[in-house]
Image (cartoon, coloured by chain):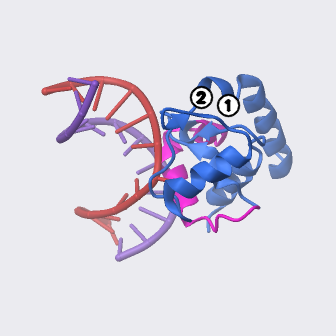
Chain colours: A blue, B red, C purple
Amino acid sequence: MSDLSLKIYSAVRLIPRGKVATYSQIAALMGNCNLRRYVGNVLHKNPCNERTPCHRVINAKGSCSCNFAFGGEEEQKKKLEAEGIVFVSGHVDMSRHLITPEDFETMRAELSKILYE
DNA sequence: CAAATGACAAAAT
DNA sequence: AATTTTGCCATTT
């Protein structure tokens, strides 16, 4: 496990309940949005427990990952709906649940604290 | 050490 | 509109 992956898990834990973030946004928190692909890799290895709510991370289109570690996208959708997230024609209602720029800033600040930057 | 891989995403067909 | 490249990056083989 590398520092970067730990950092990614930390960021995922900061996603507010009832909201979702895209892989790119998490990558942006790492300081390089091009890490988006790696973010996906890391989450795939994730133990997927309550500690790291990886189900709140979705792709840019708002659809769930078809390869969600536990139970596939069905399970992921279920978890999201349990948090009050609304789905519209098969995908998350992005305009309503995607983290706002304010959320992003908050997360960035919290992450800085955690990392003692 | 070169080549392949992947829970992505945007551009080009 | 839908499918295929093409760019990206750390990790793995």
Q: Is residue A90 magenta?
A: no
Q: Is residue A105 left or right of residue A94?
A: right
Q: Does residue A72 sit above or below A20 in this rendering?
A: below
Q: Quadrant of residue A17?
A: top right
Question: Where's residue A3, x and y in %?
Answer: 66, 60
Prevalent SS, magenta region: helix
Look at 46% across and 58% down and name the residue there: A67
The residue positioned farthest toward the front in the image shown: A89
Q: Quadrant of residue A15?
A: top right
Look at 75% across and 61% down and name the residue there: A50
Q: Amino acid at mark 1?
A: His
**The N terminus of chain A lies in quadrant:** bottom right
Disc 1 sits on a residue from what chain? A
Question: Where's residue A75, x and y in %?
Answer: 58, 57
Q: Which residue is nearer to you in this view: B5 or A31?
A: B5
Q: Amino acid at mark 2?
A: Met
Disc 2 sits on a residue from what chain? A
Q: Alpha carbon of mark 1 to alpha carbon of mark 2: how far?
A: 5 Å
Look at 51% across and 52% down and name the residue there: A40
Residues at discs 1 and 2 in contact (Cβ within 8 Å) = yes
Q: Quadrant of residue A43?
A: bottom right
Query: Please, what secondary structure does the residue beneath circle 1 have?
Result: helix
Q: Residues within 10 Å of mark 1 (few under 14, many from 20)?
A: many
Q: Do the residues at pointers 1 and 2 share their chain?
A: yes
Disc number for residue A66: none
**Residue with the mark numbered 2:** A94
Look at 68% across and 38% down and name the residue there: A85
**The C terminus of chain A lies in quadrant:** top right
Q: Which residues are magenta?
A: A25-50
**Residue with the mark numbered 1:** A97
